[in-house]
């Protein structure tokens, strides 16, 4: 047997399978290095596309194969098992096979593997083929019955429990599903239990299964699950459909979490939470991810994707749904700003580099490489734009039609768009181009004023992306409001629909020339290019009724200030400092919002901003200007900081919007205060804090000011037994390191006894933080580039998926000077030249280097 060269798969080549599956019976006799998997699968020939029986299978030791109980001739390669059509019956038949697999040595964490003595699975996208021979493609949906045999006390699979005895348990899932939603867990686990009564009165048992010692960290996740179930009934009319819903926390996991039918498997960092060990950010993430995976029960599981090119159909929609949920649970204004920060930091970065791709890609080598910010976050923005264009009523009507029409099916983006065309009577073909055209549109605007009429003249263009030179205009919902010079809003939020390359919109009957607030709520994922002086920005910062644009004006002032400091070496403008001071000290405003205003643009954001303005970014100059501005702000706010710090003590810890908002402002204030008081307040808080948000916030403030080594050691002594807190300990040191220290600190941490490359969370804690420390990653000696490349080369044979994903750290190499560009491409070529490099990593590095 020889390995096949990696093949590119194209959307246009989609064909239905030769066989459909009716039912699947699986028996697992679990053993760490020799698990026996017996399968009994009823196949039906697909009369639309008759042909050989083609089953996927990788790294399986095949023991036997029969068809209708009799031996059959077949062919096996290292990726497939094929039975010729001529050797098969023309009617439905039963295929049985027995294979052996080795979960204990499976370090790729795909298929069935072991994590701290427990068996678990990860099958999306193509992991099921590492469990047994099967048509491992999402359009093949079947009813699964699973028997697990083991001496472990807890044995779980999808669906409802059917029967159990000493050493075995059987599960039956009545809902047809693709193999990527299969799951199995066995281990010595404890359950934190709850219950939920659905809107039709059905009782559902809820459990979060964890390792001993983690049972006190489940209550928040359970409440988030109950809130999600209620929300999906109330907002989308969708009810849960099994007797039981189980969540399992796993330490070794490549992704955040997985929506397997009735048995969600979570990276423990995305489900466990307690005030002492978790920050507010973790609580918020847990709430959002539990909701996301739960919402997949309808958008992903009951209705799934026809093929992996349609990934955004389930992910974009489900991200949009979890964003709406989090907004309802907390604050829509704050949530929207956080979403845009994420979108710009990850998706715009991707869209403006060599990895740019369509929301629905048209080809791939390894689908694992397309679980991207573009598919997820831009996919969600597209849903949000659709809703803005057609209105709330039509949006929900369309969703209901989608659920009714396609329940139990594997569908496409075309099916999704069609329901909205039907309920609105509109042709959405142009809008659907958002799925097939990559790149971030640039939207420019200028204004003319003539005797009571304001005209907004827009133009749009999208830069070329790899493989797409020519771009067409997109459909853009542009939300606009007008503010009179006295600060009153004369035209409330209105959605303008732009469809052409250049288009003008007029507002008449105005008595005085107003100031336009454009792209309110970030109504389209574009880069808005608008000439605006600091006075106008400050005016909108003070008077705009749209919270996103209010924040955006502060953000633009901060960016302009930093650009001027970097490029011209000038001091920050008075307008900016005064406006920021007014905003931050305004006690009538939401503390979470004020914290977001106080946060400076990231170094990576500034690098992209400079690059877009035609300036080659110098990472050291960006770092220094930003540090300099932090010191200037600390001095400007000298008299206000202690009062703000005291006023935003949230008291007893509650992980709600109110408490976390106050703490976020308090920590942002502390970070500046530490520059004034040599760390006195932060040291004091570090000693006395009763929650991780403040303890870690204090430590970060100290480390960012270049102090705090004693606190760092005592943090370790206090928390070395808690692996999730230890991830923070690793991460904080690298994230807060000064540029010239970052690579050295990361290197030292890899020698620490608690570092393990086999655990994706720990690996990301060090190297994700290094890649995220802009100045440190791009330090002039190139040490960080080399260190990351060294470790990616080591990790690739163990865990190709995580390796490939981490290569994204290098995607911005074209932004920088020739020296840095050369150093990065040298490392990328070194990775690519590694013998036996995985297909995942080969594809990523090749794309980053560009053809
Ligand atoms: Zn998802």
Image: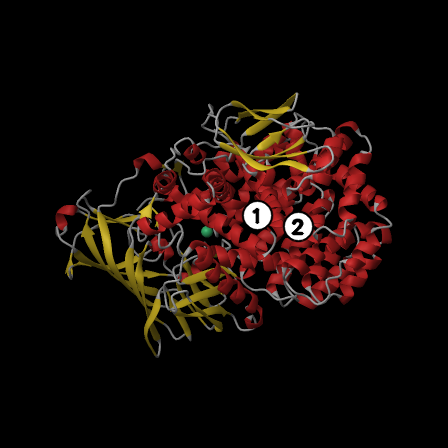
Give residue 250's position: percent from left, percent from top.
50, 63
Write the residue at 48% across / 51% down: 321
> In terms of image quadrants, where is residue 297?
bottom left
State the SS at label 1: helix
Which residue is situated farthest in the top direction here? 450
Residue 134 vs 342, above or below: the answer is below
The answer to whether residue 729 is seen in the rendering is: no
Of 767 and 153, which appears nearest the observer? 153
- Counting from the top left corner in percent of width and height, residue 131 is at 34, 58
As displayed, is residue 301 above or below residue 827? below
Q: Looking at the image, which residue is at 79% across and 58% down?
A: 647
Residue 173 to residue 351: above or below: below
**212 and 306: which is toward the camera:** 306
- Image position, residue 618 (x, y; %): 70, 32
Q: Earlier in the sequence, mark 1 or mark 2?
A: 2
Name the disc covering residue 516, or none: none
* Label 2: element kind: helix
Disc 1 from disc 2: Cα separation: 11 Å
Point out the residue furthest to the bottom here.
166
**How many dots with numbers?**
2
Q: Which residue is mark 2?
A: 746
Q: Residue at x 39, y 32 (%)?
A: 429
Q: Note whether residue 347 is visible.
A: yes
Callout 1 crowding tier (Cα within 10 Å): few <14, some 14–19, many ≥20: some
Mark 2, residues whose alpha carbon is within 10 Å: few (<14), some, or many (≥20)? many
Q: Which mark is residue 791?
A: 1
């Amino acid at each position: 047997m020889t390995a096949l060269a990696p093949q590119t798969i194209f959307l246009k080549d989609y064909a239905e399978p030769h066989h459909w599956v009716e039912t699947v019976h699986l028996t697992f006799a679990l053993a760490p290095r020799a698990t026996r998997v017996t399968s009994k699968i009823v196949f039906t020939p697909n009369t639309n596309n008759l042909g050989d029986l083609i089953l996927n299978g990788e790294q399986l030791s095949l023991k036997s194969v029969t068809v209708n109980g009799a031996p059959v001739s077949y062919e096996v390669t290292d990726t497939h098992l094929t039975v010729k059509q001529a050797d098969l019956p023309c009617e439905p038949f039963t295929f049985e096979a027995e294979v052996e697999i080795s979960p204990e040595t499976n370090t790729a964490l795909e298929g069935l593997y072991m994590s701290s003595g427990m068996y678990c699975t990860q099958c999306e996208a193509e992991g099921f083929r590492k469990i047994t021979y099967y048509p491992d493609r999402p359009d093949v949906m079947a009813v699964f019955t699973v028997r697990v045999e083991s001496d472990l006390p807890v044995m779980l699979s999808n669906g409802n429990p059917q029967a159990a005895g000493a050493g075995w348990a059987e599960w039956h899932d009545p809902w047809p599903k693709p193999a990527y939603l299969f799951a199995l867990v066995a281990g010595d686990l404890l359950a934190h239990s709850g219950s939920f009564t659905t809107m039709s009165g059905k009782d559902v048992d809820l459990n979060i299964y964890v390792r001993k010692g983690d049972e006190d960290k489940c209550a928040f996740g359970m409440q988030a699950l109950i809130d999600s179930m209620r929300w999906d009934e109330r907002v989308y009319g969708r009810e849960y459909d099994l007797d039981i819903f189980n969540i399992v926390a796993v330490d070794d996991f490549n992704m955040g979490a997985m929506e397997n039918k009735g048995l969600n498997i979570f990276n423990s960092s995305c489900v466990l939470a307690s005030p002492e060990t978790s920050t507010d950010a973790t609580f918020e993430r847990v709430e959002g991810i539990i909701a996301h995976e739960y919402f997949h029960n309808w958008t992903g599981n009951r209705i799934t994707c026809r093929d992996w090119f349609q990934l955004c159909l389930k992910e974009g929609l489900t991200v949009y749904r979890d964003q709406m949920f989090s907004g309802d649970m907390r604050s829509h204004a704050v949530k929207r700003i956080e979403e845009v920060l994420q979108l710009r930091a990850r998706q715009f970065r991707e869209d403006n580099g060599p990895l740019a791709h369509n929301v629905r890609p048209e080809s791939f080598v390894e689908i694992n490489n397309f679980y991207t910010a573009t598919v997820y976050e831009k996919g969600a923005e597209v849903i949000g734009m659709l809703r803005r264009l057609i209105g709330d009523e039509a949006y929900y009507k369309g969703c209901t039609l989608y659920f009714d029409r396609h329940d139990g099916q594997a569908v496409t983006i075309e099916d999704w768009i069609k329901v909205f065309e039907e309920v609105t009577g509109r042709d959405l073909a142009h809008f659907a181009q958002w799925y097939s055209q990559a790149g971030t549109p640039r939207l420019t605007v200028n204004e003319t004023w003539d005797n009571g009429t304001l005209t907004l003249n827009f133009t749009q263009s999208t830069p070329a992306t790899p493989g797409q030179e020519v771009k067409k205009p997109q459909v853009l919902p542009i939300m606009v409001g007008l503010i009179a010079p006295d600060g009153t809003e004369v035209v409330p939020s209105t959605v303008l629909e732009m469809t052409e390359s250049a288009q003008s919109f007029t507002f008449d009957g105005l008595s005085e020339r107003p100031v336009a607030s454009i792209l309110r709520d970030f109504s389209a994922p574009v880069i808005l290019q608008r000439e605006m002086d600091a006075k106008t920005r400050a005016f909108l910062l003070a008077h705009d009724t749209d919270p996103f644009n209010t924040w955006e004006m502060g953000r633009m002032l901060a960016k302009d200030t930093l650009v001027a400091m970097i490029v011209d070496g000038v001091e920050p403008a008075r307008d900016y400092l005064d406006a920021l001071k007014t905003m931050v000290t305004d006690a009538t405003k939401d503390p979470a919002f004020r914290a977001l205003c106080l946060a400076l643009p990231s170094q990576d954001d500034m690098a992209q901003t400079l690059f877009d303005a035609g300036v080659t970014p110098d990472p050291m100059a960006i770092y220094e200007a930003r540090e300099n501005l932090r010191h200037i702000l600390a001095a400007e706010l000298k008299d206000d900081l202690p009062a703000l710090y005291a006023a935003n003590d949230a008291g007893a810890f509650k992980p709600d919007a109110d408490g976390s908002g106050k703490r976020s402002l308090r920590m942002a204030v502390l970070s500046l205060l530490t520059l004034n008081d040599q760390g006195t307040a932060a040291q004091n808080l570090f000693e006395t804090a009763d929650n991780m948000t403040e303890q870690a916030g204090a430590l970060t403030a100290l480390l960012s000011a270049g102090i705090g080594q004693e606190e760092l050691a005592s943090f370790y002594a206090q928390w070395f037994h808690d692996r999730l807190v230890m991830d923070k300990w690793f991460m904080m040191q690298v994230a807060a390191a000064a540029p010239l220290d970052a690579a050295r600190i990361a290197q030292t941490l890899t020698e620490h006894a608690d570092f393990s490359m086999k655990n994706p969370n720990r690996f990301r804690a060090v190297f994700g933080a290094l890649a995220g420390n802009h100045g440190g990653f791009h330090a002039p000696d190139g040490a960080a580039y080399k260190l990351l490349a060294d470790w990616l080369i080591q990790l690739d044979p163990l865990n190709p998926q995580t390796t490939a994903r981490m290569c994204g750290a290098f995607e911005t190499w074209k932004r920088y000077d020739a020296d840095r560009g050369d150093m990065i491409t040298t490392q990328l070529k070194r990775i690519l030249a590694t013998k036996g490099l995985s297909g995942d990593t080969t594809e990523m590095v090749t794309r980053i280097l560009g053809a």
